[in-house]
Image: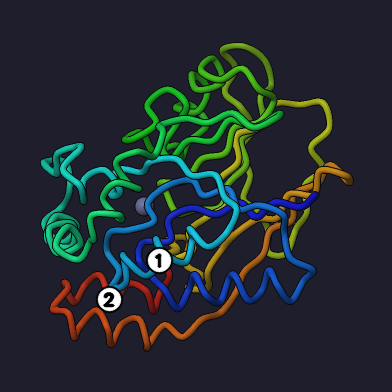
Amino acid sequence: MRYAIMADIHANLAAFQAVLSDIERRQGVGQIWCLGDVVGYGPDPSECIALLREYDHLGVAGNHDWAAVGQVDTSDFNPDAAAACLWTGHQLSPEDRSYLENLPLTLEKGDFTLVHGSPRDPIWEYLLYAESACESFHHFKTSFCLIGHSHVPLVFEHRGDDIPPSLSDFPLGSTIKLGGRRLIVNPGGVGQPRDGDPRASYLVYDDAEGVIHHRRVPYDVAQTQKKMLGANLPVRLAARLSYGY
Ligand code: ZN
């Protein structure tokens, strides 16, 4: 079976729809694994939750998901993120709130552990550097851990206890063979990429072949920006989508 692995949709309906269309165009998947932050920053939180829920999926909680329902506080958010979070909270239906409140912090599925931030601190820790990722390999039991939160597609490969893992980008359109090693993998962001490429980023895991494919999908950035400005969301949050940062 094939699984779509995605993170940080961030209420960007146009980006999410573009990813779903890309999946359909390429034979579809049996299940979506969503690594948190369905909402926050973007203009369509309720619509993104509803669309995700139309699919067979597994989901874990992100910092923005829980902040929007008051389950974690926003004191660590920058002012723009906090303003968007407050706005998001007002858009959610009781069903949306209940969905977000009940997302687990961590899930295990076969050889994979799913979290938003890191296996050590699922809500808040960013894994961007080999040194900080080193400790994380002690905090999950499966071969592979899937993370989001940084919005940057990355692969950390374990090289031994207390040795910093190797760190590599996910080159465009590349495929990684899973094999008998331990990896921490970030699919990049769907709704607010931060690696300098504005296109939505996601992965497809094929369990028969034991490989993960990286995919990039263009979407109508201007449409999302127009909705954000119409909703009086912070201008800087709309502008950054043009640059993928
Ligand atoms: Zn995020």
Q: Position of residue 186 (x, y in %)?
A: 56, 46
- Work out which residue is located at the far right of the displayed protein and give it: 209
- Front-lying residue, 168 or 213: 213
- Work out which residue is located at the far front of the displayed protein and give it: 95
Give the residue drawn at x 38%, y 41%. Answer: 61
Q: Position of residue 139 (x, y in %)?
A: 51, 17
Give the residue drawn at x 20%, y 62%. Answer: 88
Residue pointed to by mark 1 = 48
Question: Left or right: 89 with respect to 5?
Answer: left
- Front-lying residue, 22 or 94: 94
Query: The disc labelled 2 sits on which kind of residue?
Result: Ala
Query: The disc labelled 1 sits on which kind of residue?
Result: Cys
Foreground tag (1 vs 2): 1
Give the residue drawn at x 79%, y 68%. Answer: 27
- Crowding at dot 2, Cα within 10 Å, few <14 / some 14-19 / many 20+, comes out as many
The quarter of the displayed image where residue 145 is located: top right
- Front-lying residue, 175 or 39: 39
Give the residue drawn at x 74%, y 76%. Answer: 25
Quadrant of the frame with the C terminus: bottom left
The quarter of the displayed image where residue 89 is located: bottom left
The structure's colour scheme is rainbow
The quarter of the displayed image where residue 208 is located: top right
First in sequence: mark 1 vs mark 2: 1
Question: Left or right: 164 with respect to 172?
Answer: left
Q: Position of residue 132 (x, y in %)?
A: 44, 27
Q: Position of residue 241 (x, y in %)?
A: 37, 74
Question: Left or right: 174 with respect to 120?
Answer: right
Q: Secondary structure at mark 2?
A: helix
Identify the mark at residue 238; answer none if there is no mark: 2
